[in-house]
Every structure is written in C-alpha cells, then in structure tokens.
Amino acid sequence: MTSPEQSSDWKDLELERLYLDFTEEHLNPLWTQLGDLMPMTPTSKAMPFVWRWSRLYPLAARAGDLVPVGRGGERRAIALANPGLGGLPYATPTLWAAIQYLGPKEVAPEHRHSQNAFRFVVEGEGVWTVVNGDPVAMRRGDFLLTPGWHFHGHHNETNQPMAWLDGLDIPFAHHIDTGFFEFGSDAVTDDSTPDISRSERLWVHPGLRPLVGLDASASSPIAAYRWEHTDRALAEQLALEDEGYPATIEPGHAAVRYSNPTTGGDVMPTIRAEFHRLREGTRTRTRRDVGSAIYQVFEGAGRIHLGDDVHTVHKGDLFTVPSWTPLSIESQSSLDLFVFSDAPIMERLHLARSLVVEGA
Ligand code: GTQ
Ligand code: FE2
C-alpha cells in the first residue's frame, strides 16, 4: 500500500515527465497558457505612448547630416518603436509610423512593395512624391497615398529640408508573410513639379466620377487629399452646428474620413485615415475600439486621456492607442488631429467592436 503522501509525490514526478515529453514532441498544453492566449478582453502588448515632435524633428535632422539617402537604405525614415513591442520598429502590432527626412535637393530612389503607405505633412513643403510616374506635391496638411505595388520615389526641389509622417502596414504584412519588394528607377521617372497631380486633375471634382474610372478599385485613385478641402469640410461642420444643423459627431467635434471615391470605403485595404477638429474646451466621450490607432496633433494643444494616464500634447506630437484602450480627447485650444488605424482589417474580418464608456 502507498500512503496518500507517496502517491502525490508519484503524481508530481509523472506530471514533470509529461511536460518534458510534451516539450520533446513540440507540443504545448493549452491549460498553462489560456489566460494570455484567450483573454476576456484584448490585452495588447503594445503600450499607449507619446512621441514629441520637439524631439523627433532634431533627431531626423541629425540623421539628415550623417546618413546618406539612396539605393540600399532607400529611405531616411525613423520608425516609432512601441516600448511594449520588444524594440521592433512597430508603432502598434499592425502599423508602422515613421518620420522621414529629405535634405535640400535630395532624391529617394523609386521602388515598390506590397505594403500600403501614405504620407501626412505636419509642416513644410518642397518635396514631390512620384507615384507610378505621377509627381505629387507635398504641402502642410496634405494626406498622400502610395497604395501597395505602386512605384514611388521622392525628390526635394528646394534648398530647405522637409520632414513628414509615413504610415504603412509593415508590421501586419510581416506577421502574415505577404511582403514583396522591387527596385525601380534610381532617380525619379518624372522630375517635373506641377502644383497638382494628374490623379487630382482626373479625380478631385466634388461628387463627380470620371467615366474612365467606373470600376471599383481596392485603393483610392486620389494621390493627394489637399488641406484646403479638409480644412473647409471641418470648418463647415462647425459652422452648421452653430446654425443648429446636425453636422458634428458630438458637440464641438467635427470629423471627416478620407475615402476611396470608387467604393465610398476606406482609402486603402488595411489603413483608415481621418481628420478631427475639436472646438476649444471640448471633451470627447471615452471610447474603446478593437484594433490600434496612431494620432498626430496637427495644430493646437490638448489633454489626452489614454488608458490610466493623461498626456498634454502639442503640434506634431504622436501617440499610439493600442486595441481596446480607453481614449478621450480634451482640447485646450481649437485642436486639429490626424489619425490612422487598422480599422479596415478589423471590419473586413468581422472583428470590429466599439464601446462608448458611459459617464466618463
Ligand atoms: O517612403 O517608400 O517609412 O518604403 C518605410 C518604408 C517609407 C517609403 C517608410 C518605405 C517608405
Ligand atoms: Fe516605399
């Protein structure tokens, strides 16, 4: 007869042996990892985090002095590395965000990749990005597209440097192994400097679609969404609100989404982009969303209630909102914000969820 004590010793030994044999056979029991793998609500490793423009820009300028741009490195882009993601150049689990810097008369050579990309300009001008041979001027407030597999190169025509925000779905493409890349021309295929692109001349006339472009396309054919249109749309929402018409998503909060005119949906298959304007002294409802987002302050100052913390942000500052993190934005002046997210992925896969937190 074994005593109860002896039998429990025997069981411990057997259990230890079982786990060793699991490891040997490359097996992993669910019961030791369930909490992390199947949480009650999303528990992102990404952290809410703020990067200051006042720190980013001088660092980019130093890189401009020391690091050549050209074939090989391809881009003088400095990626935001979320401190929760192990030092990888990922702003969130799905999205890349970088500050790219091009010195006077510099040229970034052409290439293409399956990853979708955009540029957003918080200050400066003088660079043309050439997208599939179409030169597109970059100016403050403009939102510019480089959808997947479009050739693109950038050239600075001025004697001033220029820096801007790049957003791409690089981390998502890396997780799911969908990356393809090809080099293009060493210079840019068209170094002319038109005020507006051929794409805009064809596509940007309110409510009008060219009959040569009636097929739905996966990404928007509009190469540049200009600040004058964004600004006017937001100003009109607030003016209409003043006149008593319902035009804002909540009091004092105007917002637009950049859209693909061939579908009415998001500009690219993996990336949503929007622009928000809060009147001075407005606080948005606290909300949580599945998926991750990155904001950049375009103008003004505000207090960002993000997770358990509050951050004061100014022009150019960037912050990440990991999946399901509570977010409320409070304006201390009129506050303009650019934001991009992976919402199209979540919606297409029927994974999108939102919650407006009552009473917050
Ligand atoms: O401008 O082509 O920030 O390919 C990362 C990858 C920018 C670009 C980035 C890129 C680019
Ligand atoms: Fe690129």
Image (cartoon, helix red, strand yellow):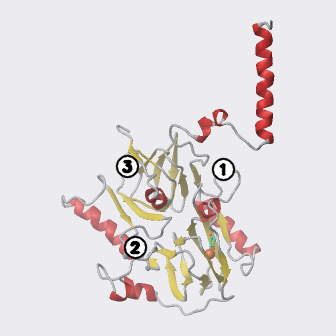
Q: Which of 75/114 is in front? A: 114
Q: Position of residue 134 (x, y in %)?
A: 52, 88
Res. 36 visible in picture:
yes
Q: Which of 103/110 is in front? A: 110
Q: Residues within 10 Å of mark 3 (few under 14, many from 20)?
A: some
Ligand 1 has an atom within 8 Å of the beta carbon of the residue at disc 1: no
241 left or right, relative to 53: left
Q: Amino acid at mark 1?
A: Pro
Identity of the residue drawn at 55% across and 93% down = 192
Question: Which corner quadrant of the image does residue 183 belong to?
Answer: bottom right
Q: Earlier in the sequence, mark 1 or mark 3?
A: 1
> Cα distance, mark 1 to mark 2?
33 Å
- Disc number at residue 260? 2
Name the secondary structure under disc 2. Answer: loop
- Disc number at residue 284? 3
Name the secondary structure under disc 3. Answer: loop
- Count the marks: 3
Q: Position of residue 112 (x, y in %)?
A: 62, 79
Q: Which of 356/176 is in front? A: 176
Identity of the residue drawn at 81% across and 41% down = 24
Ligand 1 has an atom within 8 Å of the beta carbon of the residue at disc 3: no
Question: Which corner quadrant of the image does residue 236 belong to?
Answer: bottom left
Q: Earlier in the sequence, mark 1 or mark 2?
A: 1
Q: Amino acid at mark 2?
A: Asn
Q: Residues within 10 Å of mark 2 (few under 14, many from 20)?
A: some
Res. 196 visible in picture:
no
> Cα distance, mark 2 to mark 3?
27 Å
Location of mark 1 (residue): 83
Question: Relative to 24, does residue 160 appear above or below in the rendering?
Answer: below
Question: Relative to 291, does residue 359 appear above or below in the rendering?
Answer: above
Of the two numbered discs 1 and 2 in the rendering, the one whose residue sits closer to the viewer: 2
Quarter of the image where ligand 2 sits: bottom right
